[in-house]
Image (cartoon, rainbow, N blue to C red):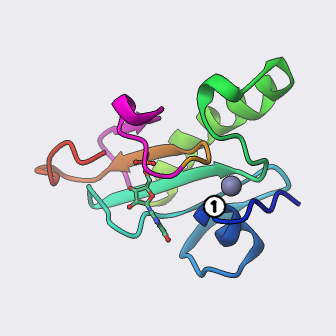
Amino acid sequence: MSEHADCIFCKILEGSIPSRKAYEDEDVIAFHDIRPAAPIHLLIVPRAHIPMLQDATAEHERLLGKMLLLAPKLAKEQGAGNGFRVVINNGPDGGQEVYHLHVHVLAGPRPWKGMAV
Ligand code: 5GP
Ligand code: ZN
């Protein structure tokens, strides 16, 4: 397990903070963002506590590919019929709030709530 004290997403992964899950397997989970910026707003989160994309290494290549390939699959499952947006915020200037790598998947009919993510 990848329990990092004070990491909200590790707590969601271990189950001590509830979430509305959309998918899970041995490598990743996906759940609905608590403050959705679009009608469909999922977060795809690796079980491994990788803080940012710049902390990922060659050993994470397969994991990162898996996260990206899940995006269209989960968007479709959630009802996205007309495209979707994928966002990874990195560091302060990237607008990152939670320092456990995650992929935002945003979809649904526009207008959305702006560029919150
Ligand atoms: P970041 O800005 O780090 O890319 O995005 C973090 C995202 O996590 C935000 O969109 C925020 O709404 C979401 N978030 C923060 N805390 C929680 C939580 O406890 N549960 C869920 N489901 N989402 C959260
Ligand atoms: Zn974490």
59 or 49: nearer the eye? Answer: 49
Q: Quadrant of the N terminus?
A: bottom right
Viewer-proximal residue, 99 or 84?
Answer: 99
Residue furthest out toward the left: 111
Q: Quadrant of ligand 2?
A: bottom right
Which residue sits at x=77%, y=53%?
A: 47
Q: Which residue is mark 1?
A: 7
Give the image quarter of residue 56: top right
Q: Is residue 37 left or right of residue 45?
A: left
Q: Which residues are magenta?
A: 79-98
Taking the magenta stretch, the answer to whether it contains residue 44 is no
- Residue at 15% across / 54% down in the picture? 113
x and y percentages locating residue 28 in the rendered image: 73, 52
| Main secondary-structure element of the magenta-colored stretch | loop
Position in image of residue 24 (x %, y %): 72, 61
**Mark 1 Cβ inside 8 Å of ligand 2:** yes
Q: Which residue corresponds to the image point at 14% horizontal and 47% vertical from the top-left? A: 114
Task: Judge whether 72 appears above or below 79 on screen.
Answer: above
